[in-house]
Amino acid sequence: MSKHAKRLTAPKAVKIPRRESKFIVKPRPGPHPQERSMALLLVVRDMLGYARNSREAKKIIKAGKIFVDGRPRKDHKFPVGLMDIIHIPEAGVYKVVLFDTKGRLVLKDLPEERAGVKLCRINNKTVVKGGHIQLNLHDGRNILIRVKDPTKPEEDVYSTKDTVLLDLNSGSIVKHLRYKEGNLAYIIGGSHMGEVAKIKEIKKVRSPQPNVVVLTRDGEEFETIEDYVFVIGEEESVLPEVLN
């Protein structure tokens, strides 16, 4: 498999000039799908403008100057994707990775006081040895929820499509946002990608097809599938500075 990809055929999510050169660096397999992520080198060089070329970008990254979710990442092919927190200590820069309305990954400024937490959607959950619950999050993380009594797991209050707010230092859950009617959602796919709307109704579909969600935004209604719904708050967004 090629280590590079042609710029003209790069995933839509990669927001870069298409005609500057023939190839771009492909992200390694990791926490985000390749079609919805970009290599850290592209973030440093093309999005942040901290390097003029790949050589300079690699030097910055290998020096451990770029943090992703609170950890220095020295692999220039590390995949960066939705809701990741980018921190450059020497520059005092904090960014969060989002989608714009054209489905491209973009960086938005983030206040320092909000950079220690991250929104993660629960994509799946499993029961592991001992009856404990493991939450599988959208960025590849697994969170273990320990239960006292497997026959009555009172600690299991989480469902798929819910969102949790994680403390990046401890890895603990700070807040739990339910996937339910009335809550705010960030749309991560479809024709309304990048928009914030309120969940009006969740339609259960009795077929292999995904459930349909009816949302409202500025008095108008639209529908999308639940796979494209990422809960970000209740009455207000947990990240109001970047998702307004």
Image (tube, rainbow, N blue to C red):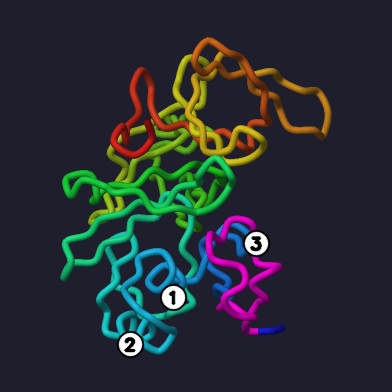
The image position of residue 166, as x and y in percent, is 32, 46
Q: Answer above or below: position of 38 versus 115.
A: below
Mark 1 or mark 2: whose residue is earlier in sequence: 1
Residue drawn at point x = 38 percent, y = 45 percent: 146
Query: In the rendering, at what x and y percent does residue 24 appear?
Result: 58, 77
Residue 169: percent from the left, percent from the top? 23, 56
Residue drawn at (61%, 15%) of the image:
221
**Magenta residues, start to end:** 3-25
Q: Is residue 9 above or below residue 177?
A: below
Q: Position of residue 114 (x, y in %)?
A: 23, 44
- Residue under circle 3? 11
Which of the image's four quarters has the N terminus?
bottom right
- Location of mark 2 (residue): 59
Choose the circle earlier in sequence order: 3 or 2. Answer: 3
Mark 1 and mark 2: span between their CA atoms? 10 Å
User: Which residue type does callout 1 highlight?
Assistant: Leu
User: Relative to 119, is 180 on the left or the right?
Assistant: right
Task: Please tell me the numbered disc located at residue 41.
Answer: 1
Foreground residue, 127 or 9?
9
Which three-letter amino acid code belongs to the residue tagged 2? Lys
The residue type indicated by label 3 comes to Pro
The C terminus, quarter of image: top left
